[in-house]
Image (tube, grey):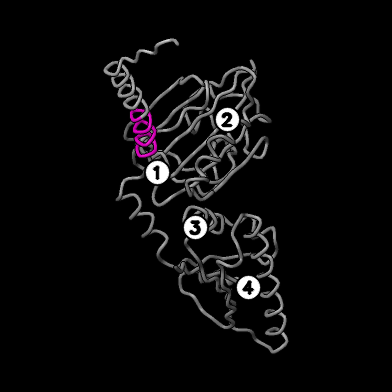
């Protein structure tokens, strides 16, 4: 019979070493779960095998918050409802590995943010975003992001007082880049934005649908609603005092049609009808409008919680 010799001290030492290794791995995993910040407030996860081309962690003045497509108006590159705020910016620019698409980089980060509870303010793809050179040169000031208009995508969302932005593009040489921003405005900027949206606004509105789409005041209202998802509003359609009963009936029908056009337009801009309440007021006077011009209708917007 063969004898089996067991080195008890050595075996104990080996078992202790294995136990320590397993314990360390468990603790390491738990620490990773604890250290990962909610909504990535202090850091951005790196796209798998991507190379970081640019990394920024600094205070910024006049940082652009864009919630609509880019366009050129009278030679000036702009976006409806754009805001320029002071705050702290964390930015990472990634060069994606070969074989990956701009859509993969875009979806990777948008899915991460949505999974953390970030609410979408605006999203566009391809030509609906406007020209890529507008985003590269006028918004991000990074020439590397100038790529193919059809191979671009932009996303901006918000959680609490922090904005999350993703821009992905394929350059003409085939290289894929994805930019990720986390921007937190300074407290005084958020207070100023709240004060600006706190009061009601009254403006002239043409009854036709084209007049609604051309209204810069209504465009600004849409931008504020998109930036503040918790904001609701009362919209009051006013008219002056009619001269006859027939005129009263005609105006009432036109105001109801105008309300339907406004609802349709706001729905197209991503504003749910559940956030809106309407009222029609006939025979109202308003001193804030030009007394020399007597409009058929005007719209009053009252922000509500």
Q: The N terminus lies in which quarter of the figure?
A: top left
Q: Is residue 87 above or below residue 236?
A: above
Magenta-drawn stretch, dominant element (helix, strand or loop) = helix
Foreground: disc 3 or disc 4: 3
Which residue in the rendered view is the most extreme toward the bottom?
A: 245
Quadrant of the rendered image containing residue 273: bottom right
Which residue in the rendered view is the most extreme toward the left?
A: 9
Q: CA distance from mark 1 to mark 3?
A: 20 Å
Mark 2 secondary-structure assignment: helix
Q: Please name the residue that numbered disc 4 is placed on.
A: 296
Q: Which of the numbered marks, if any, corresponds to residue 105?
A: 2
Which residue in the rendered view is the most extreme toward the top?
A: 2
Q: Which of the numbered marks, if any, corresponds to residue 38?
A: 1
Q: CA distance from mark 3 to mark 2?
A: 26 Å
Cβ–Cβ under 8 Å for marks 3 and 4: no
Q: Please name the residue that numbered disc 3 is placed on.
A: 229
Q: Mark 2 or 1 closer to N-term?
A: 1
């Amino acid at each position: 019979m063969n004898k089996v010799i067991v080195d008890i001290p050595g075996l104990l030492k080996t078992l202790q070493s294995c136990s320590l290794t397993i314990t360390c791995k468990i603790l390491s995993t738990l620490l990773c779960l604890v250290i990962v910040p909610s909504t990535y407030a202090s850091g951005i996860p790196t796209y798998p095998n991507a190379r970081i081309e640019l990394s920024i962690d600094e205070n910024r003045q006049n940082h652009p918050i864009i919630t609509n497509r880019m366009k050129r108006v009278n030679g000036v590159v702009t976006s409806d409802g754009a805001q320029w705020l002071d705050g702290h910016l964390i930015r990472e620019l990634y060069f994606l590995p070969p074989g990956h698409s701009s859509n993969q980089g875009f979806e990777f980060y948008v899915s991460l943010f949505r999974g953390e509870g970030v609410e979408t303010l605006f999203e566009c793809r391809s030509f609906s975003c406007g020209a890529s050179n507008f985003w590269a040169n006028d918004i991000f000031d990074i020439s590397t992001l100038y790529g193919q208009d059809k191979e671009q995508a932009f996303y901006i969302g918000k959680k609490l007082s922090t904005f999350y932005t993703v821009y992905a593009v394929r350059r003409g040489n085939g290289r894929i880049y994805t930019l990720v921003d986390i921007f937190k405005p300074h407290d005084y900027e958020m207070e100023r934005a709240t004060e600006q949206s706190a009061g009601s606004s009254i403006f002239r509105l043409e009854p036709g649908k084209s007049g609604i789409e051309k209204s810069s005041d209504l465009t600004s209202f849409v931008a504020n609603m998109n930036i503040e998802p918790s904001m609701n509003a009362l919209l009051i359609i006013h008219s002056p005092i009619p001269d006859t009963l027939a005129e009263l009936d005609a105006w009432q029908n036109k105001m109801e049609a105008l309300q339907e056009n406004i609802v349709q337009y706001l729905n197209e801009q991503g504003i749910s009808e559940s956030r809106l309440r309407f009222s029609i007021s006939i025979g109202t006077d308003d001193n804030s409008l030009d007394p020399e011009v007597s409009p058929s209708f005007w719209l009053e917007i009252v922000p509500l919680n």
